[in-house]
């Protein structure tokens, strides 16, 4: 399937969604659900939460197809941006409440006490509940927690941007990276597998990593995956 | 970058950690290391081109040593090396996590409850929509070589089980060619091209396979998927006006509603063949869809039974039944997912199956019944509880298997 949908597909899909065509919703899901789900999972590290974000993102697109502006980027990048926004909201909501009792810890890691409390909390549509963002009595604790949360969001954002970059880079670069990284092929074997010269394999590996490195360029908490709107 | 100046000794080339800068170790600590690789003389251009491979630990020991020596004296390259190595840390090997195939139905359903569709997918097209999406998700996850994995398609030719060898990509070609019957009936493009094309599914498949000038590859996926999306979209717009449209299959025809259900069934069965070939798990359809597939097979049974009787492959009718009247029946009790009770008229397709006229009963699992109908399990081996008229039972089980074809 084409990774970079032509703008014509995007505009037509937007029209069909606006018209209320259920078949278009199905096609939209088929094209973007793997992206949405894997990105949400990468950011939240929780299967149920990723399912929920997937549901919420498709709700939003189906109910607000007019919110997509083709001038700002591809529909794919818009959907990735929505996923990121929703995942960040969930991170803030979940860990804002969670931190009150458990102190400082890396919330991306599994709960050290094994209680799995935050896993269960992720099940409900509770992200925006006032409790989740309630400030604790101790102001300095709140600051520290806020910093920790921003760090978490920044890391998740970089990870999501990296996945998006890998998924969107030209297929020859992605194939070279997969051979070298996942299958542990050296660059000469990679070249042979791809039927290119060693020089070309070196070029692809370097270019692929250069693209990927841009995920680290602007790791502000609020920045979204590249490609839609005012992102770097 | 800092500290590059103290890394001038040859020891640093050997540092396995590839940290930048490589901490300098006393020379006498290195006695246990193997002989250092000969550092080749490489141009700046080549060294720069190696940075990606170096960051991925994908160059030779000599090249690694040359790059690392170079990094101690070239700040721009050292800077890039650091960035590229950080980028490697963003890669991960778990690949695309398996998306729960059942999530699709849940997400679409909740979307549609929030904003009802103005152009809904007709309920009779839902199994086709769901099964094609499930197969597509499986295809998305398999690698290029797996598209060439051998698949043996099996069916029951009326008297015995038979088969045909193809590949995963060949199976998708088969589905594309036969789905094309529905496309053609709806006035859409035929995947076999223009002109008069055969109507029988087998001939269409052979035509499709032989028209390919080389073995099919994963490139078959997109045309197949585009066609299935187009079919769902077209029947959504046409709605009820096309539901009774007749789809010809050569020696028989089905109304469009049944035809798409039959295509959904085939899609599931062949998805199972593909999943077996590439060693993936694959679940049966949702209960409601499975129930409709079983119901379709059951509705086709009396005519198939009559056909087998004419061909001398089934026992003679015992009674003359007036059309529309209840006649001798077999009670099919399907257990488990998609199950239910059906009464199959034995003596004539025009008769009505009736609990009051039951002469035999067969009980089996829904998925097992579908495997029988798909020709994947021979009628004599079908795991079925049986009671009553043995000839009736045998005739029905053989007729069920005879519903299968390539």
Image (cartoon, rainbow, N blue to C red):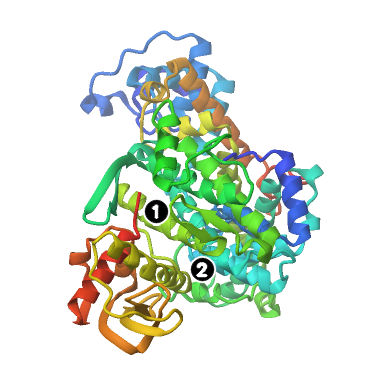
Query: Which residue is located at x 67 percent, y 56 percent?
Result: A24
Tag 1: Cα neighbours inside 10 Å, few (<14), some, or many (≥20)?
A: many
State which mark lies toward you, 2 or 1: 1
Answer with the quarter of the image where residue B242 lies: bottom right
Where is residue B359? Give x, y as percent: 26, 85
* Distance between mark 2 and mark 1 Cα atoms: 27 Å
Would you say residue B384 is visible in this rendering? no
Q: For this view, does A105 lie left or right of residue B240?
A: left
Along the line of sight, the residue nearer the viewer: B403 or A160: B403
Q: For this view, does B236 lie left or right of residue A43?
A: right
In what quadrant of the picture does the N terminus of chain B appear? Answer: top right
Where is residue B288? Give x, y as percent: 47, 74
Query: Which residue is located at x 24 percent, y 49 percent?
Result: B162
Answer with the quarter of the image where residue A44 lies: bottom right
Would you say residue B366 is visible in this rendering? yes
Are callouts 2 and 1 both on one chain?
Answer: no
Where is residue A67? Give x, y as percent: 80, 56
Query: Which residue is located at x 46 percent, y 30 percent?
Result: A176
Mark number, residue B184: none
Up-down: is B114 above or below B328?
above
Query: Which residue is located at x 27 percent, y 26 percent?
Result: B30
Location of mark 1 (residue): B271
Please tell me how many numbered marks the rendered image carries.
2
* Secondary structure type for disc 2: helix
Location of mark 2 (residue): A48
The subunit letter for the residue under badge 1 reads: B
The subunit letter for the residue under badge 2 reads: A
* Secondary structure type for disc 1: helix
Where is residue A156? Give x, y as percent: 58, 54
Tag 2: Cα neighbours inside 10 Å, few (<14), some, or many (≥20)?
A: some
């Amino acid at each position: 399937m084409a990774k970079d949908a032509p703008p014509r597909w995007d505009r037509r899909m937007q029209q069909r969604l606006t018209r209320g065509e259920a078949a278009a919703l199905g096609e939209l899901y088929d094209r973007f659900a793997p992206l949405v789900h894997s990105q949400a999972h990468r950011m939240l590290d929780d299967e149920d939460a990723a399912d929920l974000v997937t549901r919420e993102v498709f709700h939003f697109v189906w109910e607000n197809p007019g919110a997509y502006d083709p001038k700002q980027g591809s529909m794919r990048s818009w959907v990735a941006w929505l996923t990121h926004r929703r995942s960040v909201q969930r991170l803030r909501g979940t860990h804002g409440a969670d931190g009150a009792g458990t102190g400082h810890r890396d919330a991306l890691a599994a709960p050290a006490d094994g209680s799995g409390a935050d896993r269960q909390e992720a099940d409900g549509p509770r992200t925006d509940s006032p409790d989740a963002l309630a400030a604790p009595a101790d102001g300095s604790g709140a600051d520290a927690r806020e910093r920790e949360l921003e760090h978490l969001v920044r890391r998740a954002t970089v990870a999501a941007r990296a996945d998006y970059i890998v998924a969107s880079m030209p297929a020859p670069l992605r194939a070279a990276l997969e051979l070298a990284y996942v299958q542990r092929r050296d660059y000469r074997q990679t070249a042979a597998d791809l039927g290119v010269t060693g020089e070309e394999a070196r070029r692809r590996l370097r270019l692929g990593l250069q693209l990927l490195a841009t995920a680290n360029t602007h790791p502000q908490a609020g920045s979204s995956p590249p490609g839609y709107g005012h992102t770097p | 970058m800092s500290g590059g100046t103290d890394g001038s000794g040859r020891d640093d080339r050997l540092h396995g950690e590839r940290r930048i800068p490589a901490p300098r170790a006393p020379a006498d600590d290195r006695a246990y290391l193997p002989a250092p690789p000969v550092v080749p003389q490489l141009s700046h251009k080549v060294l720069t081109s190696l940075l990606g491979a170096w960051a991925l630990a994908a160059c030779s020991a000599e090249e690694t040593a040359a790059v690392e020596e170079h990094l101690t004296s070239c700040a721009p390259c050292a800077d890039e090396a650091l960035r590229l190595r950080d980028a490697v840390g963003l890669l991960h090997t778990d690949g695309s996590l398996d998306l729960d195939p059942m999530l699709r139905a849940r997400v679409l359903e909740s979307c549609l409850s929030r904003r009802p569709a103005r152009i809904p997918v007709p309920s009779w097209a839902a199994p086709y929509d769901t099964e094609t999406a499930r197969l597509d998700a499986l295809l998305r996850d398999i690698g290029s070589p797996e598209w060439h994995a051998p698949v043996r398609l099996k069916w029951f030719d009326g008297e015995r089980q038979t088969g045909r060898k193809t590949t995963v990509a060949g199976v998708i070609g088969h589905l594309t060619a036969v789905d094309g019957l529905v496309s053609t009936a709806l006035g859409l493009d035929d995947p076999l091209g223009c002109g008069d094309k055969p109507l029988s599914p087998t001939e269409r498949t052979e035509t499709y396979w032989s028209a390919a000038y080389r073995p099919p590859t994963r490139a078959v996926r997109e045309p197949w998927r585009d066609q299935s999306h187009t079919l769902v979209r077209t029947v959504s717009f046409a709605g009820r006006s096309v539901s009774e449209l007749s789809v010809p299959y050569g020696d028989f025809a089905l109304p469009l509603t049944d035809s798409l259900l039959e295509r959904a069934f085939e899609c599931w069965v062949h998805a199972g063949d593909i999943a077996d070939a590439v060693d993936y798990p694959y679940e049966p359809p949702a209960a409601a869809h499975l129930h409709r597939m079983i119901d379709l097979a059951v509705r086709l049974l009396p005519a198939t039974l009559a056909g087998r009787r004419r061909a001398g492959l089934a026992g003679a009718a015992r009674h003359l039944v007036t059309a529309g009247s209840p006649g001798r029946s077999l009670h099919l009790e399907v257990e488990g997912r998609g199950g239910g009770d059906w009464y199959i008229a034995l003596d004539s397709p025009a008769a009505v199956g009736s609990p009051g006229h039951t002469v035999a009963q067969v009980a089996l699992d829904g998925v097992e019944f579908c495997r029988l109908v798909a020709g994947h399990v021979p009628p004599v081996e079908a795991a079925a509880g049986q009671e009553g008229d043995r000839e009736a039972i045998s005739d029905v089980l053989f007729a069920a298997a005879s519903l299968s074809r390539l």
